[in-house]
Amino acid sequence: MSVKIRLARRGRKKQAMYDVVVADARAPRDGRFIEKIGTYNPNTDPASIKLDDNKAFDWVMKGAQPTDTVRAMLSYRGVMMRKHLQVGVNKGAITQEEADKKLEAWIKDKESKIQGKVDTLAKAKADKKKAALEAEKKVSDARAEELKKKAQEAEAALVEEIKEGGAEGNDDVEEDVAEIEETQAAEAKTEAPAEEAKEEAPAEEKKEEPKAEVKEETPAEEAKEEPKAEAKEEAPAEEAKEEDKKEG
């Protein structure tokens, strides 16, 4: 009886998984089998292969013929390399120790390559995710800025319309405009507190100026009092004129 090492399908639609089985070549693909020696999942990257290497090697040495897919899997796991070295040992071309050393070196090199591929794929996936997040953030920021700009334009247009008298008599609109102006004034106060502090100093100086003006007005009052002295000086002259009239 000819024996094959092949795959038996299982799993749901579009998520297929496979068992690595040893079966009679005359049996159906998913039918009876002699022994299950591993599993194969092609849905991961890289594909997940779980295999009992010793059992697979024993069946290969007994003459079991793997299918093309299973042969590639056995080569990937080093089973075919082990068979090749064991045939050389059986023929006396190399010793068992040399064969074991070569197989161990081959497995280490293969594992390093597999790990390098896994790391490369993980890095590429992380970079792709990061780039997607950055692009999404740029789009969201641009959208938020556009919405903010539109809202500001709408507020400005509403205020202008009310100022021009286009919305007179509408109490709701006037209240909205008042609220908008209050919020804008509050924002202006919070944004420029230093400028208000600078403007307060000149106002105090202006309040002090009237004091100097009061002091300057005192000479004018003295000027008003001078005619009284002149009136006193003119009185003796009038008395002298009356005495001359009496003597005459």
Image: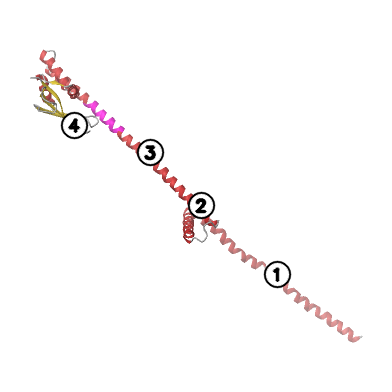
Q: Residue at x 59, y 61 (%)?
A: 206
Residue sitting farthest toward the right: 248
Residue 145, placed above or below residue 196: above
Name the residue: 12% across, 15% down. Answer: 89
* Residue placed most toward the observer, 88 or 137: 137
Sequence-wise, which precedes: disc 3 or disc 2? 3
- Amino acid type, callout 2: Ala
The numbered disc on residue 220 is 1
Q: Secondary structure at mark 3?
A: helix
Residue 17 badge? 4
Residue 166 position, x and y percent, is 53, 56
Q: Which mark is residue 135?
A: 3
Residue drawn at x 71%, y 72% is: 222
Q: Are marks 1 and 3 in contact (CB under 8 Å)?
A: no
- In this picture, which residue range is highlighted in magenta? 111-124
Q: Earlier in the sequence, mark 4 or mark 1?
A: 4
Q: Earlier in the sequence, mark 1 or mark 2?
A: 2
Asked whether 118 falls inside the magenta stretch, the response is yes
Q: Tell me which corner region of the image, top left, top right, bottom left or bottom right, holds residue 234.
A: bottom right
| Tag in front: 4 or 1 | 4
